[in-house]
């Protein structure tokens, strides 16, 4: 039995279903939800941090570290954190040889989960508000960042939709770009470029693992957009087909050769 796909797509019931799918997917995709700060007592996460110093195109210094964070306690609205570091450093000498070293260290930190303040006029970079919108200004460290767009990133095998934030008051020789998961506001990745004469420093930090549970919306949000595109394509297919058909017919009429007349 031959199935007429276009006739099927023209059915009123299917059109209404597609419109409902598009509308609900857009609502779930666009509306920001106010989630609580993702960091609480008992949570932990690990960053991979790296610095590369380049002199006239050649790497002369390399530093790599894993920072393991654990929220150990809470008192009077303040979270206490323990950070354990395992690091490795390589330094290039003037004769072209390299020296290497490894180290381990531990330090403590604290943060107010309501304001993200981790000191006087210093704001942590571990998360941002979950209600961000395009163009919002967010304090991170001692700088101000503007939300400039959305992008998709793969973290731990998952596709995450992330806000892109760029610093607006950094020194002229530095460039800061941060990425935060859109639903929870959790930090995902940053890249910092700094230039000092012939030297260029590239600094990166990325989330490699976490005990924080991703909300269902975090996992589904990228697919809502794909659903909107797919359903919109099915909804407009009959109209596009009719438009192409009419354009072909108009072209055929325009290029039709005049008939020879016999007298």
Image: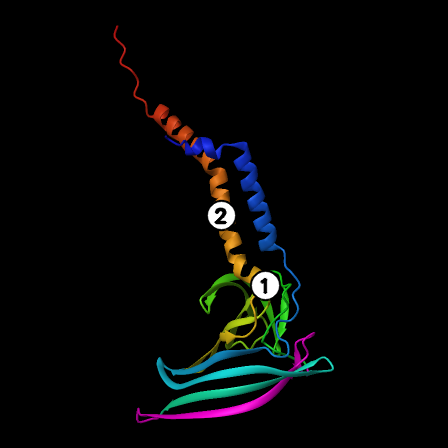
**Residues drawn in magenta:** 93-120
Q: Where is residue 112 shown, x and y percent of the image?
A: 68, 79
Residue 75, compared with residue 1, is above or below; it is: below
Gap between marks 1 and 2 measured at Cα: 21 Å
Residue assigned mark 1: 183
Left or right: 245 with respect to 29? left
Instruction: Classify the position of the N terminus by image quarter.
Output: top left
> Coloured how?
rainbow
Where disc 1 sits, the SS reads loop
Q: Where is residue 195 shown, x and y percent of the image?
A: 46, 79
Kindly tell me whether residue 231 is visible in this rendering.
Answer: yes
* Label whose residue precedes the other's in the sequence (1 or 2): 1
Residue 244, compared with residue 21, is above or below; it is: above
Q: Does the magenta portion include 117?
A: yes
| Residue at the spot 67% in from the left edge and 76% down from the top edge | 113
Instruction: Classify the position of the C terminus by image quarter.
Output: top left
Res. 229 mark? 2
Residue 106, compared with residue 242, is above or below; it is: below
């Amino acid at each position: 039995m031959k199935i007429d796909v276009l006739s099927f797509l023209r059915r009123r019931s299917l059109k209404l279903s597609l419109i409902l799918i598009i509308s609900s997917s857009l609502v779930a995709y666009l509306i920001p939800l106010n989630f609580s700060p993702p960091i609480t007592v008992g949570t932990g996460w690990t960053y991979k941090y790296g610095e590369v110093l380049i002199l006239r195109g050649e790497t002369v210094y390399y530093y790599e570290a894993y920072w393991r964070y654990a929220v150990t306690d809470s008192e009077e609205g303040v979270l206490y954190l323990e950070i354990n570091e395992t690091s490795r450093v390589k330094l290039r000498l003037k004769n072209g040889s390299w020296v290497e070293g490894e180290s381990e260290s531990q330090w403590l930190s604290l943060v107010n989960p309501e304001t993200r303040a981790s000191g006087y006029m210093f704001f942590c970079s571990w998360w941002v508000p979950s209600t961000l919108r395009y163009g919002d200004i967010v304090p991170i460290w001692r700088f101000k960042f503007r939300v400039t767009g959305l992008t998709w990133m793969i973290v731990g095998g998952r596709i995450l939709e992330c806000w892109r934030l760029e610093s607006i008051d950094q020194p002229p020789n530095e460039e800061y770009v941060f990425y935060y998961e859109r639903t929870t506001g959790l930090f995902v990745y940053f890249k910092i470029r700094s230039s000092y004469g012939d030297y260029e420093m590239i600094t990166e930090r990325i989330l490699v693992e976490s005990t924080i549970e991703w909300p269902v919306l975090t996992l589904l949000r990228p697919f809502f957009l794909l659903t909107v595109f797919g359903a919109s394509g099915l909804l407009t297919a009959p109209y596009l087909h009719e438009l192409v058909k009419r354009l072909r017919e108009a072209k055929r009429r325009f290029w039709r050769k005049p008939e020879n007349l016999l007298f």
